[in-house]
């Protein structure tokens, strides 16, 4: 019996990417066990309460899950208020601003819970409602905009789970009721589709505005000033409404989030509780000339943000990052600062986070931005002058969902203690515009761990002088040209990895060669084995790669508890270079935990990579072994053996059964059918020995006693045992040749 378990039977780390992101934001999801549920209005009197222009309408009673409150704003109330009087000389139709504040139990402070299912809905002419179908919101009437009828909603507030929502709509917006006039009633619905969290209390206010530019900025509560008194409400260049320009040290759309400003080369530390965020911001000065000058630079801009998650209070050796007490499950997010000032949220994780380091449980996380499109000029001048800057947010979320279950080992410390470092290329230096001037040093994450030299492959000055890569490059996908790397670490002898973070051995795999290694890995250390495949010595069709892996440490824990040990397998790439979007599973990368292998069998069964599963041209397979500090901080000894084995021949497919010889169908007409006994053995041999051959006509006419002829097949009975069926097909001479009676005799017998 083959005891090998194929490597492809294990889950792909790349395929689980989206699942892990869902796990990050699980507590803000719209989870419901029901396939369809509709918001149910609660009774608040014989008629729905009316909103008054300029007044704050509040509801102090808690709104339970799948319940909603209904409000109305009749046109009479709008026309009667002095602030809604239109200026005849103005071309503006006038606007209505609907504002909503989600508050705490006391109704005084904003509700800090990230409730994504609390919605403010607005429609003209009909009452809007919402349903959940297959965990998706369905609005009734369907979602609309200010240009056509339908349900209106603050989509940005819904995306970022804001406690403050607003809808700005022209007064002459079309109605959702067919045939009704433009002066129709406005209907407001406050829905709580969040389960099981209730909506404690809320307040709603409607204001009349002469123009959209008159809309105030967001305020934490109705009684507080715009921007909460921590910023100025100004109109950005080319904007539609005003936004908050926060004071230094504050951020978000309402300037209520602490966001310290980071300088070039500066560091910062933070202690982040489970399921909590921490924010920073930075400003990269842009050269004079704006986007045109930025595009004309010889090499693209570079912004590097590093996070140290080193356990035990130390950083990774050689990275230049110290401090960081470990703990938690941090996710590093770096995004350009939007004009609204909104800080990063779960919706920004997939495109703007370092997911490779997150999935690999690394101590060093980083984000290196080189795309000039991300360095957009801020709408506000730098230092109140004429110079512009590209503003960015840096956010760290301490996820408490990935390992918070009975089936997963808990973290050694759920509180994250991290250290940040920020560096960028100064785009205003003359050296950036002069190819002959000395270049500032390139930026490499972790400074190549002190085991290599940093190069900038996108600098024209390095053209033709870059050292060879550590691994042969993969062939481009779909014929597309490979984009230059954002950085390159040329590792010294014995070091390997994207950042030179580990040590490596190399194996030229042949029919007779094998790798046998035994290493002791301290917490936070990598060991790589680069297996080179040669088409002349390795047959992808008939050979497989066999991997045996054993782990032991000095603790009394069972092998199924070695959650800190895992193995990665990639095609021509180190683990940090895994491509989650690739169609090839080995390009996405495998991640195998020793604890899972030991639960199936201890010692674990050998793992096998079938040669037929490898993509021709992938001339190297990188096997990595890592000791993570997230769960345990214990050194262990890793024993690894890699060799090539012959693939067993494919099983021969079963031979299909011989088709049964069917009795030919009875021809139509007045054909004769006889039941005849098989001829004697001697005669059968003379006829060729075929039992299915028709007997001669002479024997066919001699019927056994008790049998009679039948016409046209009507009433033909099954032959007795030992009998067989013969038919006389055709007509005329063919029938007579088969021994049938002549036509004249046949007609005479029928008349009788």
Image (cartoon, rainbow, N blue to C red):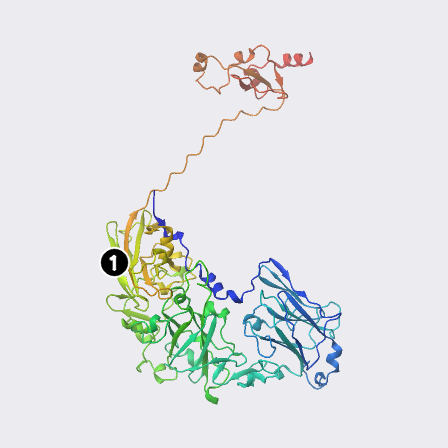
Q: Nearer the viewer, residue 499 or 427?
A: 499
Residue 369 visible at all:
no
Q: Nearer the viewer, residue 290 or 426?
A: 426
Q: For label 1, count other residues whose C-alpha is less than 10 Å away and answer few (under 14), some (14-19) or many (20+).
A: few
* Residue 350, image x, y percentages: 46, 67
Q: Nearer the viewer, residue 155 or 593?
A: 593
* Residue 426, image x, y percentages: 38, 82
Q: Residue at x 48, y 86 (%)?
A: 381
Residue 552 figure quarter: bottom left
Q: Is residue 149 left or right of residue 676?
A: right
| Furthest residue in direction front, as rendered | 556
Q: Is residue 24 left or right of residue 492?
A: right
In the rendered view of the protein, which quadrant contains the C terminus? top right
Residue 204 figure quarter: bottom right
Q: Nearer the viewer, residue 209 or 559?
A: 559
* Residue 347, image x, y percentages: 50, 69
Residue 294 visible at all:
yes
Relative to 84, residue 666 above or below: above
* Residue 19, image x, y percentages: 47, 61
In the rendered view of the protein, which quadrant contains the N terminus? top left
| Helix, strand or loop under label 1 | strand
Question: Which residue position holds label 1?
Answer: 518
Relative to 136, residue 270 above or below: below
């Amino acid at each position: 019996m083959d005891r090998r378990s194929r490597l492809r039977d294990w889950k792909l780390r790349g395929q689980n990417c989206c699942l892990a992101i869902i796990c990050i934001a699980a507590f803000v999801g719209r989870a419901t066990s029901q396939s369809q549920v509709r918001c149910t209005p609660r009774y608040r009197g014989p008629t729905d309460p009316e909103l008054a222009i300029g007044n704050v309408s509040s509801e102090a009673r808690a709104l339970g899950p799948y319940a909603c409150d209904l409000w109305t704003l009749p046109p009479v109330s709008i026309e009667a208020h002095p602030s809604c009087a239109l200026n005849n000389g103005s071309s503006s139709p006038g606007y209505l601003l609907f504002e909503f504040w989600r508050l705490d139990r006391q109704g005084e402070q904003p509700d800090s819970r990230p409730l994504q299912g609390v919605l403010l809905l607005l429609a003209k002419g009909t009452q809007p409602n919402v349903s959940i179908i297959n965990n998706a919101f369905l609005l009734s009437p369907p979602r609309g905009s200010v240009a056509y009828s339908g349900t209106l909603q603050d989509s940005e507030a819904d995306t970022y789970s804001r406690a403050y929502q607003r809808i700005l709509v022209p007064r002459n917006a079309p109605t959702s009721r067919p045939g009704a006039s433009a002066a129709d009633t406005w209907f407001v619905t406050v829905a709580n589709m969040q389960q099981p969290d209730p909506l404690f209390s809320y307040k709603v206010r409607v204001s009349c505005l002469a123009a959209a530019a008159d809309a105030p900025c967001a305020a934490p509560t109705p009684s507080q000033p715009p921007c909460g008194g921590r910023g100025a409400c100004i109109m950005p260049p080319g904007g539609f409404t005003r936004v908050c320009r926060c004071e230094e040290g504050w951020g978000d759309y309402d300037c209520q989030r602490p966001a310290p400003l980071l300088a070039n080369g500066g560091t910062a530390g933070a202690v982040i509780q489970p399921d909590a965020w921490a924010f920073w911001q930075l400003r990269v000065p842009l050269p004079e000339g704006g986007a045109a000058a930025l595009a004309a630079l010889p090499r693209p801009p570079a912004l590097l943000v590093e996070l140290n998650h080193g356990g035990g209070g130390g950083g990774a050796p050689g990275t230049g990052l110290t401090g960081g007490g470990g703990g938690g499950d941090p996710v590093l997010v770096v995004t350009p600062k939007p004009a609204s000032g909104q800080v990063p949220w779960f919706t920004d994780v997939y495109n703007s986070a370092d997911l490779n380091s997150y999935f690999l449980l690394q101590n060093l996380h980083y984000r290196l931005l080189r795309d000039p499109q991300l360095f957009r000029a801020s709408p506000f001048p730098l230092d109140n002058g004429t110079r512009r800057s590209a503003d960015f947010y840096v956010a760290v979320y301490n996820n408490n969902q990935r390992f918070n279950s009975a089936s997963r080992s808990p973290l050694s410390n759920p509180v994250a203690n991290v250290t940040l470092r920020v560096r960028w290329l100064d785009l205003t230096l003359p050296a950036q515009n002069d190819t002959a001037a000395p270049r500032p040093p390139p930026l490499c994450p972790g400074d190549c761990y002190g085991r290599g030299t940093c190069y900038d492959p996108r600098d024209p000055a390095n053209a033709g002088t870059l050292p060879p890569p550590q691994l042969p490059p993969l062939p481009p996908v779909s014929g597309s040209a490979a984009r230059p790397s954002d950085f390159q670490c040329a590792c010294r002898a014995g070091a390997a990895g994207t950042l030179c973070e580990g040590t490596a051995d190399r194996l030229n795999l042949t029919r007779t060669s094998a790798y046998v290694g035994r290493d002791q890995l301290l917490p936070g250390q990598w060991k790589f084995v680069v297996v080179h495949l040669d088409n002349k010595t390795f047959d992808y069709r008939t050979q497989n790669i066999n991997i045996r892996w054993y782990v032991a440490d000095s603790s009394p824990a069972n092998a199924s508890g070695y959650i800190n040990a895992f193995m990665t397998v990639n095609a021509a790439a180190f683990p940090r270079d895994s491509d989650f979007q690739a169609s090839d599973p080995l390009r996405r990368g495998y991640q195998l935990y020793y604890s899972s292998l030991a639960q199936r069998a201890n010692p674990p069964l050998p793992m096998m990579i079938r040669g037929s599963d490898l993509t021709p041209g992938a001339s190297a397979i990188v096997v990595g072994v890592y000791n993570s500090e997230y769960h345990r901080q214990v050194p262990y000894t890793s024993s690894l053996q890699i060799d090539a084995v012959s693939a067993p021949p494919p099983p021969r497919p079963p031979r299909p059964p011989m088709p049964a010889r069917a009795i030919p169908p009875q021809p139509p007409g007045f054909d004769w059918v006889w039941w005849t006994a098989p001829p004697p053995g001697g005669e059968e041999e003379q006829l060729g020995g075929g039992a299915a051959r028709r007997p001669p006509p002479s024997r066919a006419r001699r019927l056994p006693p008790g049998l009679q002829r039948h016409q046209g097949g009507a009433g033909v009975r099954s032959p007795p045992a030992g009998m067989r069926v013969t038919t006389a097909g055709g007509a005329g001479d063919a029938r007579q040749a088969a021994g049938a009676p002549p036509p004249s005799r046949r007609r005479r017998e029928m008349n009788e």
